[in-house]
Image: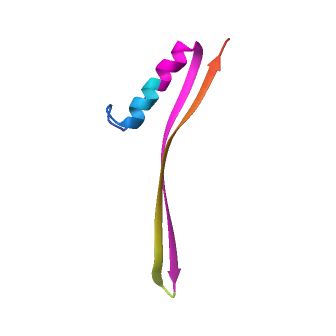
């Protein structure tokens, strides 16, 4: 698993647990993706910034294959 996050990061720990659980359940392949998404909406009127609203989302995508 490649990650720019530190090993004690909660997301990395969760992903490690998910991989172990997938192995325990007999999965032959597991694909996990960590996603950090930042979106920023700006409203400009008459050349001036009126509103700025950033949003932050973090999650894990999981795909597993069971059987041959």
Residue depicted at 60% across the width and 28% down the height: 63
Q: Looking at the image, is 16 positioned above or below residue 51?
A: above
Is residue 3 shown to the viewer in this render?
Answer: no
Q: Position of residue 8 (x, y in %)?
A: 31, 33
Is residue 11 shown to the viewer in this render?
Answer: yes
Quarter of the picture containing the C terminus is top right
Query: Which residue is nearer to you in this view: 58 or 4?
Result: 58
Residue depicted at 46% across the width and 71% down the height: 52
Q: Position of residue 26 (x, y in %)?
A: 58, 12
Q: How many marks?
A: 0
The dominant secondary structure in magenta is: strand
Residue situated furthest right in the rendering = 68
Query: Magenta region: which residues?
Result: 18-45
Q: Is residue 43 magenta?
A: yes
Residue depicted at 49% across the width and 25% down the height: 18
Residue depicted at 51% across the width and 19% down the height: 21
Q: Is residue 40 magenta?
A: yes
């Amino acid at each position: 698993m490649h990650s720019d996050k530190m090993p004690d990061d909660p997301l990395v720990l969760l992903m490690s647990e998910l991989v172990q659980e997938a192995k325990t359940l007999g999965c032959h392949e597991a694909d996990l993706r960590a996603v950090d998404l930042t979106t920023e909406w700006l409203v400009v009127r008459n050349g001036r910034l009126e509103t700025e609203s950033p949003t932050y989302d973090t999650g894990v995508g999981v795909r597993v294959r069971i059987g041959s």
